[in-house]
Image (spheres, rainbow, N blue to C red):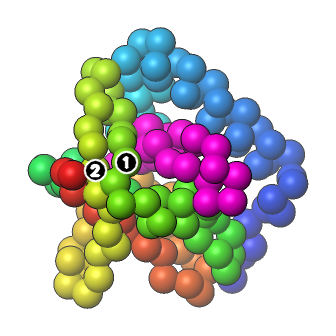
Amino acid sequence: MPKPPPADSPFWKLFHLGTRVNLVLFRATKGKVGGRMGTSPILLLHHVGRRSGEARVSPLNYLDDAPDLVVVASKGGVDAHPAWFHNLMAMDSTEVELPGGERRRVRPRVAEGAERDALWPRLVEMYKPYAEYATYTERRIPVVVLEPA
């Protein structure tokens, strides 16, 4: 099984810089620039650091499964979910920004069983790197449903 790059690698430093640039472009253009990664739409997820208490924003690929939005907790590490996932699951509700400047209040939950099995292939079809990333880890990558709050 291939291993992802170490957290302090030039790849991840460039990734985090790209994330900050994407945030600025997304907000400045209401998602016209920075609102897609390839063919996949991007939303901005607001969350609060569990330890730091600092407000954070993460751009994430999403699937519009009206009235819900669906995201994947993929790149945290080989054996760990990403920090934003832990932060989000510790919150009762939060806000997302969608292309066009729309903001929605949402409540997170993890899809399980048949619901997850139905959503996963749709997410992989929308953003193919999810399938590749799943080969880097033995953990079950969470599919998160953001329901209207």
Please name whichever residue, 4 or 104, is drawn nearer the observer in this view of the structure: 104
Q: Quadrant of residue 71?
A: bottom left
Q: Quadrant of residue 142?
A: bottom left
Residue 116 horizontal side relative to residue 14, left or right: left
Which residue is drawn at the image coordinates 44% and 38% (left, top)?
44
Residue 80: mark: none
Separation of marks 1 and 2 at Cα, in angstroms: 5 Å
Which residue is drawn at the image coordinates 45% and 66% (left, top)?
89
Residue 99 lies, with reference to residue 75, above or below; the image says above
Assess disc 1: are there few (<14), some (14-19) or many (≥20) residues with their C-alpha within 10 Å of its C-alpha: some
Assess disc 2: are there few (<14), some (14-19) or many (≥20) residues with their C-alpha within 10 Å of its C-alpha: some
Q: Does the magenta run of residues contain 47?
A: yes
- Horizontal and vertical percent position of residue 86: 54, 66
Which residue is drawn at the image coordinates 48% and 66% (left, top)?
90
Q: Is residue 74 at all visible to an observer of this figure?
A: no
Residue 16 lies, with reference to residue 80, above or below; the image says above
Residue 47 lies, with reference to residue 17, above or below; the image says below
Q: Residue furthest front?
A: 53
Q: Is residue 112 at all visible to an observer of this figure?
A: yes
Q: Residue beneath label 1, please?
A: 94
Residue 106: mark: 2
CB of mark 1 within 8 Å of CB of mark 2?
Answer: yes
State the extent of the magenta-drawn residues as a range.
43-62
Q: Quadrant of residue 145?
A: bottom left
- Horizontal and vertical percent position of residue 61: 41, 47
Say which element carries label 1: strand
Question: Earlier along the polypeptide chain: callout 1 or callout 2?
Answer: 1
Which residue is drawn at the image coordinates 46% and 19% (left, top)?
27
